[in-house]
Amino acid sequence: MPSLAAFLVLLLPPLLLSAAGAAEAEELIGFKATLRHVDADAGYTEEQLLSRALRRSSARVATLQSLAALAPGDAITAARILVLASDGEYLMEMGIGTPTRYYSAILDTGSDLIWTQCAPCLLCVDQPTPYFDPARSATYRSLGCASPACNALYYPLCYQKVCVYQYFYGDSASTAGVLANETFTFGTNETRVSLPGISFGCGNLNAGLLANGSGMVGFGRGSLSLVSQLGSPRFSYCLTSFLSPVPSRLYFGVYATLNSTNASSEPVQSTPFVVNPALPTMYFLNMTGISVGGYLLPIDPAVFAINDTDGTGGTIIDSGTTITYLAEPAYDAVRAAFASQITLPLLNVTDASVLDTCFQWPPPPRQSVTLPQLVLHFDGADWELPLQNYMLVDPSTGGGLCLAMASSSDGSIIGSYQHQNFNVLYDLENSLMSFVPAPCHLM
């Protein structure tokens, strides 16, 4: 009989699996947590921080766009489009096992599985802490092949009656190992909770980059995600300014509320989530249009819609993509509107630049420049972005003032740069996303 190590090595060819199941958990669970940017405290300059974030965004979006090259209506397709594990933007702390050992992991609203690198490790990525060793935990239990969590995988694998998982997050990142139950601990000191029986992947064969983390915490809509497993289907985050040293905040379950977070007395706005059967784990929204400088642009709403035939297109909100990517017709309209309304010369940027709507900056002496207002329109909500949420100075363009958006060949993604200093609530029970301006650095 081959060893588990030998069995895992056989998984190296891409089987491309996804998650869709969960274990039951008690209700009314909640905690508060700190989110740390993946490049925080690493000593990068502002130029390096921006360059690294844009590079991660490009890789993440490329994975989403690869849906167009795959056959429609296939479960493998849905699994293939899971967002790159190596391209998240925020890390959260989690405790695993008994006694509790703490690790940082990427928070990912685009996937479901909770996983960490485990000893013994056949192939693992460097991380700042020792690998989790299930042999040293009193509460670790591998799951059988007939368990509900194992059966929730699109293609459950079995080795000597033990459930084995494999996930691929694009071309360069993957994890494979044993599906197990364990006690997890989340939250800051005053809200810390220990939760038994959480299903997770104990990864012995991993590839990709983990941004100084040890794995991933899936916050997607599927039932193996943390949100679904804990039975408290709501969470919110408040992301501080991109270059701020102040960490961001995550609120889960009973603590996920927009009450008392509004610094500007603006009303809370809400828009329904849209289910894409081809990609059910992701948070799609019904985007209806874009206004620049008070003018609604002539963009066909179908540009933002999901293609009913194959599940391509649509608009996703994603905390792990830095800037917003707009479907090409929408981006072209926005770019033309900014070029016509800003009285500064457009810069000729290189093909390698992610941002290509860039203006000469600073303006000539004694020239007054007014930058147009930008509003994203959704079903039932109008998201008016502050200037700092859509314009930035990009040193790679020679210090040009750039629109923090780029063109996408398939679908649109509302990235985290646009979320900063908003409290954003994901309410799965009512299938609503709500948002309101908030002083995230004070929360």
Image (tube, rainbow, N blue to C red):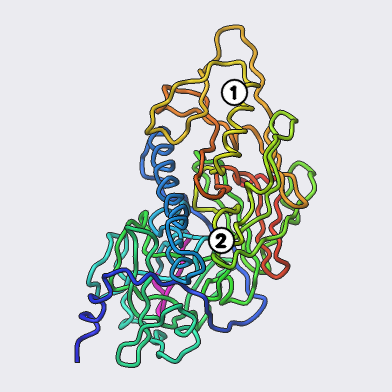
From the viewer's perspective, is residue 314 above or below residue 326? below
- The residue shown at (28%, 75%) is 11
**Magenta segment, prevailing SS (helix, strand or loop):** strand
Q: Nearer the viewer, residue 271 or 251?
A: 271
For the magenta stretch, what is the residue range?
92-101
N-terminal-most mark, 1 or 2: 2
Give neighbour class at mark 2: few <14, some 14-19, many 20+ (Cα, 10 Å): many
Question: The N terminus appears in which quarter of the rendering?
Answer: bottom left
- The residue shown at (75%, 55%) is 270
SS of the residue under disc 2: loop
Whether the magenta-drawn stretch holds residue 110 is answered as: no
Q: Nearer the viewer, residue 117 or 354?
A: 354
Hey, what amino acid is under mark 1?
Answer: Ala
**In which quarter of the view is residue 370 placed?**
top right
Give the labeled residue for mark 1: 339
Whether the magenta-drawn stretch holds residue 99 is answered as: yes
In the image, is 64 to the left or to the right of 293? left
Disc sitting over residue 311 in the figure? 2
In the image, is 203 to the left or to the right of 191? left
